[in-house]
Amino acid sequence: MVVETERDDATWYECEECGLLLDAHDEAEEHEQRCDAKDPTYVQ
């Protein structure tokens, strides 16, 4: 599930699985469908 959060006077969308913050809701939902929280390919 994507969670909307406020940081630095901006709205961000956070993946509940891995914590990745994205600035577009559509991108966050797309990420969530492909999220591999156990072994993310990016550095947090």
Image: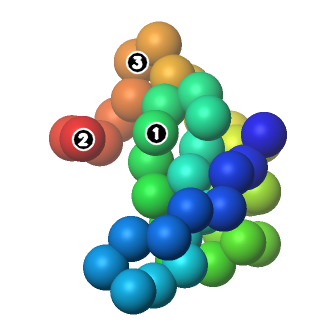
Q: Using the rendered image of the protein, determine whether residue 20 is visible from the camera's viewpoint.
A: yes
Q: Which residue is mark 2?
A: 44
Is the residue under label 1 in contact with that under label 2 (CB below 8 Å)? yes
- Helix, strand or loop status at disc 2: loop
Q: Quadrant of the C terminus?
A: top left
State the image quarter where residue 43 is shown: top left
Q: Amino acid at mark 3?
A: Asp
Q: Which residue is mark 1?
A: 19
Residue 21, compared with residue 25, is above or below; it is above
37 vs 3, nearest the viewer: 3
Relative image position of residue 29 (x, y in whole percent):
76, 57
Q: What residue sits 72% from the left and 72% below the top?
A: 25
Residue 36, compared with residue 43, is above or below; it is above
Nearer-N-terminus badge (3/1):
1
- Helix, strand or loop status at disc 3: loop
Q: Amino acid at mark 1?
A: Gly
Q: Nearer the viewer, mark 3 or mark 2?
A: 2
Relative image position of residue 14 (x, y in whole percent):
56, 52
Find residue 39 and name its label.
Answer: 3
State the image quarter where residue 8 is shown: bottom left
* Coloration of the structure image: rainbow
